[in-house]
Amino acid sequence: TPEMQAVQSKMAPVLSRHRSKCYNIPGLFEKIEEMHDVKEEKLKSGEWDAEQARLAERVYVGFVRMGAKLDEESKKEYADIQAELATLQTNFMQNVLKDEETWEMVITKEDMEGCPPDLISSARQAAIDRNHDGPTDHVITLGRSLIEPFLTYSSRRDLRKKAFDAFSSRGELSEERDNLSIATKILRLRKRQANLMDKETFAEYQTEDTMAQTPENVMKLLTDVWARAKDAADGEREMMEAFLTEKGETLEGGIQPWDWRYYAEQVRQANYNFDESELKPYLSLNAVTNAVFDVSNKLYGLKYVKREDVEAYHPDVDVYEVRRNKVDVETDDEDELVALFLHDNYARPHKSSGAWMSEYRSQKKNLVNGADPIEAVPIVSNNNNFAKGSGSTLLSFDDGVTLFHEMGHGHHGMLSDATYRSLASTSVLRDFVELPSQLMEHWLSEPAVLKEHARHHETGEPVPDELLERLKAAKLFNEGFATVEYTACALLDMAVHSLSEYDDDFDLAKFEKEYLEEQGMPQGIVMRHRPAHFAHLFASSAYAAGYYVYQWAQVLDNDVFAAFEETGDVFDPETAEKCRKYIYSSGNTVAPQELFKSFRGREPDISFFLKHKGLV
């Protein structure tokens, strides 16, 4: 709400300065450094175990990266930078939210020609939610679960353009909300932050504590994929142009960004006889939720018990106890509490856009004497932004993938088995954190999962086999577009954070335009997240010079899933147990490179990722 945003704006720099002071308590770092310097000796003598040595290493690194080794004057400057970043990043996110909350396109049902019934229903519900009383009023908002289906199915090119222009301009829809200037200030502060740490660029500073280790290693992956993805996207555009020629249609200016999804869907239907709107009635939110819970149970033995008696922070949020059978039953209880899980699935005013996993309490074992054991139990939340239907909420296949993705993060929190909270759950290196989430996505595509759970929301009939066959045949179509759309963001992120100077006349919009032209951005595609609303980069520093991590983790997750496939059973118990142990439960207790090698027995192999994307 506006009131909470005011509190957030006021407290962001205050909390940042408090955090900086915690890292600079007199004498504290000296003790940490002392422990760090003896960790090998303690480990060798048996006085410490490997997790304690890892804790000493990671705490030391965390303090150093927060400026603990700087001189007093530099420490003050570093704290000032962090506080100013906290303010700017908060303003950036609030500006995006304001654009998403206020912009809307009010249309009628007749204006939604070509749109499937569930999208029309969601647009009508959006109109009601936004207090449009007209009996024919329908509303398209800037929520991705409304805008992307509209761009995919609407036959009205003028309305597609209007919607796309607003969607791609979030963060700059009002002169009062100039996110480009905010982002430029953030870039200059990050550059100075890196310089204080003896790094020439923020990209060098940020990648130092990752699996990739250097910007050069990141670029090696991105440029390899980029070349392949551009070729694939060019081929897809040629297919669409041939389709238009065959139909005798001419588009002024050729295929534009507001056209791509629409004509890609037309080609998908014509060439593969697959219309995603045929699949959506079988992918209700309830069905996909039941599917992800079932997969979770089959792989890791987790059971989800809904608690109707527990009141959450919003009526739309479902609360579950997550339980599993005990390994060593010493009591009469057959199972044990693993976590509390909150499922917050619907879009609503003032809710952040996108999808994410949060923890209200992380797992740990080192409780103080006399503490209630419940304090060791994690409280995990999955958050989505699905457009709520007036009846059943129907998901696209991509929406279903998002739900599975976030449950992967949820597993990372719920299955965590670390002694220390700072090493638990998702507190891992940034380019490892997306492995557990992206790995989980694979099971939604499994025929056995879809046959069991993809059931018509009205009749309960299972999804037809021939529809699944058509889904499989069309799977790789438009992957070039999707990969270009993402990789362009990752390339620009690394490029803009690799600059050693940002002159007074630095223009971020100009940099975006010129850089993408240099990279040969395929005509008709824009970045999935343009700078003015690129929250991963400018609403926090977590993914800054780090948006590549999704692709880095795709190399890992496709390799891990291949291990399941090689057994002939994607629910193979032995492989699932290894996956639980090394991918989901270990957190940061072991270096991620070692965890992967423990699971797979070797270094990662990129070929599985390239094959999955159709880029071989």
Image (cartoon, rainbow, N blue to C red):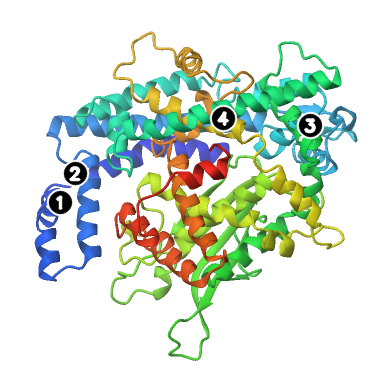
Q: Amino acid at mark 1?
A: Leu
| Residue 458 at x, y percent in the picture | 86, 58
Q: Earlier in the sequence, mark 1 or mark 3?
A: 1
Q: Which residue is mark 3?
A: 266
From the image, tell me which residue sits under label 2.
Answer: 24
Task: Identify the residue shown where x is 82% and y is 52%.
Answer: 391
Q: Along the horizontal axis of the image, is 256 left or right of 111? A: left
- Amino acid type shown at disc 2: Asn
Q: Say which element carries label 2.
A: loop
Q: CA distance from mark 2 to mark 4?
A: 42 Å
The reply to whether the C-beta atoms of the residues labelled 2 and 4 are less than 8 Å apart is no
The residue tagged with tag 3: helix, strand or loop?
Answer: helix
Residue 117 horizontal/vertical position (percent): 85, 42
Q: Earlier in the sequence, mark 1 or mark 4?
A: 1
Asked whether residue 601 is in view, the answer is yes
Real-space Cα separation, disc 1 to disc 2, in angstroms: 7 Å
Q: Residue at x 34, y 65 (%)?
A: 418
* Of callouts 2 and 3, the N-terminal one: 2
Comparing labels 1 and 4, the label whose residue is closer to the camera: 4
- Name the amino acid, label 3: Gln
The picture quadrant where one finds residue 481 is top right
Q: Are marks 1 and 2 in contact (CB under 8 Å)?
A: yes
User: From mark 2 to mark 3, how far is it between C-alphas?
Assistant: 60 Å
Of the pair 353 and 577, the residue shown nearer to us: 577
The residue carrying pointer 4 sits among few (fewer than 14), some (14 to 19) or many (20 or more) residues within 10 Å by Cα, namely: many
Give the residue at mark 4: 485
Whether residue 544 is visible, yes or no, is: no
Residue underneath mark 1: 28
